[in-house]
Image: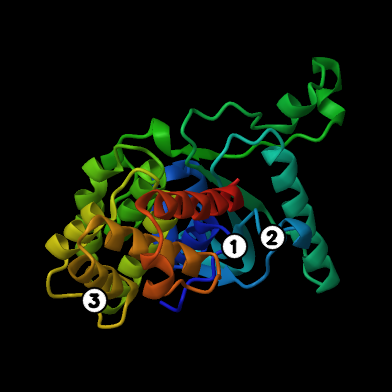
Amino acid sequence: MEDAQLPTPHNNLFHYAFSHATAVRSLLETHLPTNITGILDLSTLTLQKDSFIDPRLRESHADLLYSVQMLRQGESQGDALVYILLEHKSQSDELTCFQLLRYIVRIWEQRQRDGQPLCPVVPLVIYHGETAWSAPRSVEELTGVPQELLDCSVRFSFPLLDLGQVPDESLATDPFLQSILNLLKYGRRRDLADRLERIFQWLLEHGETKFRKEHLDAIVVYIMATSVALPMETLTMTVQKIFPTQIEPGSIADQLLKKGREEGREEGELFGRIRLLQKLLGLSQSTDEELITKSSADLDAMATELQAQLRMRMT
């Protein structure tokens, strides 16, 4: 994986994970109603390069769009497309329904400009907040439309995957997707350490070594950017335990292990955390000479401030 350019860690992990069609297929098969998946040829899932987010919101929102062919009598219909719109939320957003509706209208407008017919768009929101989703999931609920006006009002609702309300083992059948969804579920919780080994074990079960190494770097970057409570020592030891012989030289995971070996003392651990946080924020990284003159309290305050800057970007 290339050096992470992270306007928000959640968006970066979301885009990385769900740019893999196999993971998206597993997601849809597990979490969309069977009456929807039953008419889709999921083997034809194709990632679309366009984003339909307002450019002003691109740093704080993320979407991914896939096309998929419809099935008719068991055969794909090349000219009958459905779009699958994936969106993630870390907070229960009151205007999510309106936001999705705007995306769908923009998709239709683009197809119209391209001389293409309008087609169905199926959204799926992946929610990984710390409390249960409470915002409206339909236009009717959002606008408070009275019963008498329903027949002449816009009607739209969206499927929601609330990770906190689904048992861990039921989140996915694909090991890579399991690791990602469990990481999103527990990434900001204080009990992440209890699940970390299992998250990495799912990753180890992924069959393709090349992608497994990329996945590991993506997960390590995400944890460093989002987890306040997890000590770097715990992360380092867990990576070394699960992947003792599969760390790519020069990778982020390799850098993490080297820092863990070379800087085992408390100040050294903080040095590594500060530098990685600076990297994630796109800042120049402090040298040993710059950090070694600071007290433990100053280093703690510096790491806390950098962590706060990343968390601000996620909200």
Per the model, the C-alpha gap separating discs 2 and 1 is 9 Å
34, 203: nearer the viewer: 203
Could you tell which of marks 2 and 3 lies nearer the N-terminus? 2
In terms of image quadrants, where is residue 52? Answer: bottom right
| Residue identified by numbered label 2 | 58
Label 2–label 1 contact, CB within 8 A: yes
Per the model, the C-alpha gap separating discs 2 and 3 is 32 Å
Residue 290, given in percent of the width and then of the height, sits at 44, 71
Image point (66%, 36%), residue name: 157
Three-letter residue code for mark 1 = Pro
Image point (78%, 67%), residue name: 111
| Residue identified by numbered label 1 | 7
Does residue 55 appear left or right of residue 200 in this picture?
right
Per the model, the C-alpha gap separating discs 3 and 1 is 28 Å
Could you tell which of marks 3 and 1 lies nearer the N-terminus? 1
Q: Secondary structure at mark 1?
A: loop
| Residue identified by numbered label 3 | 209
Image point (28%, 50%), residue name: 231
As drawn, 3 above or below 166: below
**Quarter of the image where the C terminus is located:** top right
Does residue 235 appear left or right of residue 82 in this picture?
left
